[in-house]
Amino acid sequence: MLETSVDMAKNVVKKKVKSWLWVVAMANLPILAGVLTIFLLLFVLFTSFLILSGSINNQDTIGMYQLAPGGSAKVSKEVLRWEPLVTKYAQQYGVESYVGILLALIQQESSGTELDVMQSSESIGLPPNAITDPEYSIQVGVEHFAEVFKKSRRRY
């Protein structure tokens, strides 16, 4: 009977300790939630700072274009040589604020090294690379971009 009384006492003490631990944990829950909230806020602020600081347009970088608020892209020297023509036709078709995107398209389509710089042949029903005049490719490509862009603006 003595052992059972000792075992019973141990069980009672264990239950009391567990209940007090629960009370202490619950009492500190708001503090823990506050610390986690502050940590999360600092993490978001730090991450936002890193993202924003990485997208600042560096004037010393050749070929850096602002594509949209908070975004930029680098284009090669081969693409940059087409900038005056892209700007000319972008102004002609009313999309001059999208020169950066148009240059990025050239970077993607041909890296600025093909004759059909913007890969515009297909947009006028010709086979791929049928255009052999880079200026005409740019004219057709910018015109097509402007048409599609303006259609999308009317739709939404």
Image: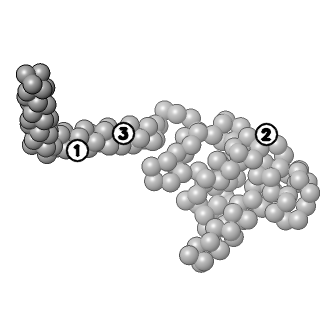
Q: Looking at numbered disc 2 in the image, what kind of residue is underneath it?
A: Thr
Residue drawn 89% across and 53% down? Answer: 128
- Point out the frontmost of discs 1 and 2: 1
Residue drawn 88% across and 51% down? Answer: 129
Using the image, determine if residue 75 lies above or below residue 9.
below
Which residue extends farthest front? Answer: 1
Real-space Cα separation, disc 2 to disc 3, in angstroms:
37 Å
| Residue 142 at least partly seen | yes
In the image, 95: left or right of 57? right
Q: Which mark is residue 47?
A: 3
Q: Badge 1: few (under 14), some or many (20 or more) residues near its Cα, within 10 Å?
A: few
Tell me which numbered mark, 3 or 1, is placed earlier along the sequence. 1
Image quadrant where one finds the C terminus = bottom right
| Residue 38 at least partly seen | no
Q: Which residue is mark 1?
A: 37
Using the image, determine if residue 138 lies above or below residue 18.
below
- Point out the frontmost of discs 3 and 1: 1
Image quadrant where one finds the N terminus = top left
Question: Looking at the rendering, which quadrant does residue 154 occupy?
Answer: bottom right
In front of the other: 85 or 124: 124
In front of the other: 124 or 23: 23
Q: Looking at numbered disc 3 in the image, what kind of residue is underneath it?
A: Thr
Tell me which numbered mark, 2 or 3, is placed earlier along the sequence. 3
In the image, 100: left or right of 143? left
Q: Badge 3: few (under 14), some or many (20 or more) residues near its Cα, within 10 Å?
A: few
Secondary structure of the residue carrying tag 1 is helix
Residue drawn 31% across and 38% down? Answer: 43
| Residue 152: % across, % down | 62, 72
Q: Which residue is mark 2?
A: 113
